[in-house]
């Protein structure tokens, strides 16, 4: 699978290698900065691969509702949809 990367503002879809698995993690993360200037990220949602090889989008608690601005949600949702298609091996023409 090709690496998946997309970023808009503080939100990013990233591909991370999994040390124990043969497939990567794909996560929606949010970049933040503490008042002291230290940068960090945390996971808002991720794609889970089940034992049959299918991917499901999993939200971390209420983070998608609290950490994605209303003006960003449409674009983020589109990118998550495209990511799901890539993980599933579908083509945009199939939809």
Image (tube, grey):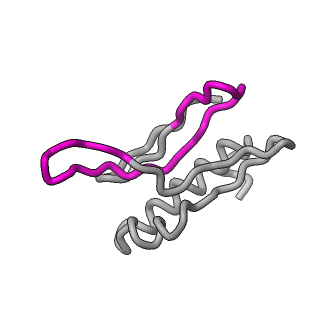
Q: Position of residue 45 (x, y in %)?
A: 54, 55
Residue displayed at 70% across by 54% down: 56
Query: What residue is drawn where x is 47% and y is 46%?
Result: 13
Residue at coordinates 60% horizontally, 38% vertically from top-left?
25
Res. 69 image quadrant: bottom left
For the residue pair 88 and 38, the one nearer the viewer reads as 38
Furthest toward the right, the residue is 52
Q: Which residues are magenta?
A: 15-41
Which quarter of the rendered picture does the N terminus lie within?
A: top right
Q: Residue 43, position in %: x, y? A: 47, 51
Q: Position of residue 70 (x, y in %)?
A: 37, 74
Q: Quadrant of the C terminus?
A: bottom right
Q: Is residue 4 left or right of residue 67?
A: right
Which residue reaches farthest front?
A: 36
Q: Position of residue 72 (x, y in %)?
A: 38, 66
Image height check: is 91 above or below 21? below
């Amino acid at each position: 699978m090709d690496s998946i990367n997309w970023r808009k503002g503080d939100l990013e879809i990233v591909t991370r290698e999994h040390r124990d698995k043969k497939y990567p993690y794909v996560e929606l993360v949010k970049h933040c900065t503490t008042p002291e200037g230290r940068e960090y990220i945390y996971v808002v949602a991720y794609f889970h691969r089940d034992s049959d090889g299918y991917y499901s989008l999993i939200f971390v608690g209420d983070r998608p509702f609290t950490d994605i601005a209303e003006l960003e949600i449409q674009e983020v949702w589109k990118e998550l949809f495209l990511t799901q298609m890539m993980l599933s091996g579908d083509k945009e023409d199939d939809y």
